[in-house]
Amino acid sequence: MRALVCESFGPVENLKVIEQSLPALKPNEVRLQVHAAGVNFPDALMVQGKYQVRPELPFIPGGECAGVIAEVGEEVKGFKAGDKVIAMPGLSAFAEQVNVDHKLLMPMPEGVSFAEAAGFCITYATSYYAFKQRAKLQEGETLVVLGAAGGVGVTAIQLGKLMGARVIACASSAEKLEFCREVGADEVINYTEEDLKERIRELTDGRGADVIYDPVGGDFTEQAYRAIAWGGRYLVIGFAAGDIPRLPLNLPLLKAGDILGIYWGGWAARDPKGNMQNFSELLNFVTKGRLKPMTTEVFSLAEFQSAFAAIRERRALGKVILSLEES
Ligand SMILES: NC(=O)c1ccc[n+]([C@@H]2O[C@H](COP(=O)([O-])OP(=O)(O)OC[C@H]3O[C@@H](n4cnc5c(N)ncnc54)[C@H](OP(=O)(O)O)[C@@H]3O)[C@@H](O)[C@H]2O)c1
């Protein structure tokens, strides 16, 4: 099988598409024929050795995928060869085949393509955990989403709307903001041209935002926090801008504000039942037509550099996918 392999930590350009054999199937695993895999911001950090998880070398990156089960181990229950599934192997998804523990599988909903299903796990699970377990987002609250046209940002718009919030999407270009409106945002702010703090205050009649979802960091964090409502919740999702911001602690004091760290993978490992319950609710939203997984850009395995460049160069709209379908 062909796989994208990281032989040493370094730039994504050093990754190689090479022929590899798959390890023997364990009794608790299925062998999956991968059709598509989701590309996430942390994948690029991981191959550079800059992520909180540093896999043993060599390794195949890729945390999530969708495909068809080719073979099942003898202890596997609930799945059979031929089933279409979504998988969260954590690693090794950027390959034509992957062995996955059956506990990390979900049935693929009807009416969803492999590309849409491949990007479903990490971003939707992160935003849902952030809103449900951490912020306890309530109907009628105002939610501000930074980096709203990016991978996790789009899911925050969709789930925020689904949970009844008024969503203000913030991004860096008119094209991205138009995309955010199409996804469902009620209001938009171009934070490279407008004053983020002032615009949030204006759009909330001076009250401020109840919940702020921040996957970007850098200078935007303090500006956004200064426009949080009394008793607001600030969700620390990530630092796509590169800089980890520092916040004067008088700000949360003055607003009775919470700063909530979000580490979905860490929570999922500690509470696998809660995580699977969240997935089951997310899949239910999809099945009932209340949530449509969004995929806008699909690249072949050979085009992996373009896939990573779309994210790095801040061009990606929504989720970036690698297709493993053609040879
Ligand atoms: N906490 C968790 O459990 C968890 C889970 C998944 C992801 N994350 C983190 O969330 C962050 C975003 O992930 P993502 O998948 O949404 O990434 P993404 O698709 O690349 O989106 C990130 C957004 O950040 C903005 N941005 C600002 N400065 C940037 C820069 N220098 N380079 C790239 N983007 C920049 C861009 O929007 P504008 O151009 O509009 O500013 C971009 O759309 C990452 O730090 C990731 O590690 C955290």
Image: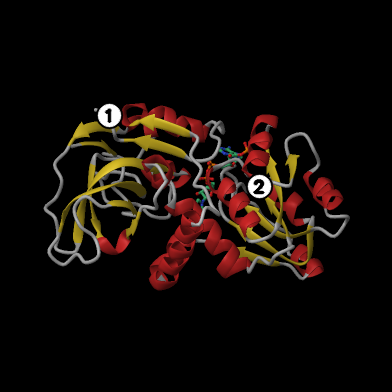
Q: Is mark 2 within 8 Å of ligand 1?
A: yes
Q: Is residue 131 above or below residue 36?
A: below
Residue 317 drawn at (x, y percent): 56, 35
> Who is closer to the viewer here, 71 or 154?
71
Residue in view at x 63 percent, y 61 percent: 163
Q: Would residue 55 be seen by someone viewing this image from the given angle?
A: no
Above or below — where is 28 with respect to 57?
A: below
Horizontal side, residue 229 vs residue 6: left or right: right
Q: Amino acid at mark 2?
A: Leu
Q: In the visual, does 117 lie left or right of 18?
A: right
Q: Which residue is mark 1?
A: 326
Instruction: Tell me the element at label 1.
Output: loop
Please say which color scheme the image uses.
secondary structure
Q: Name the element at disc 2.
A: loop
- 291 vs 70, left or right, is right
Q: Which residue is mark 2?
A: 146
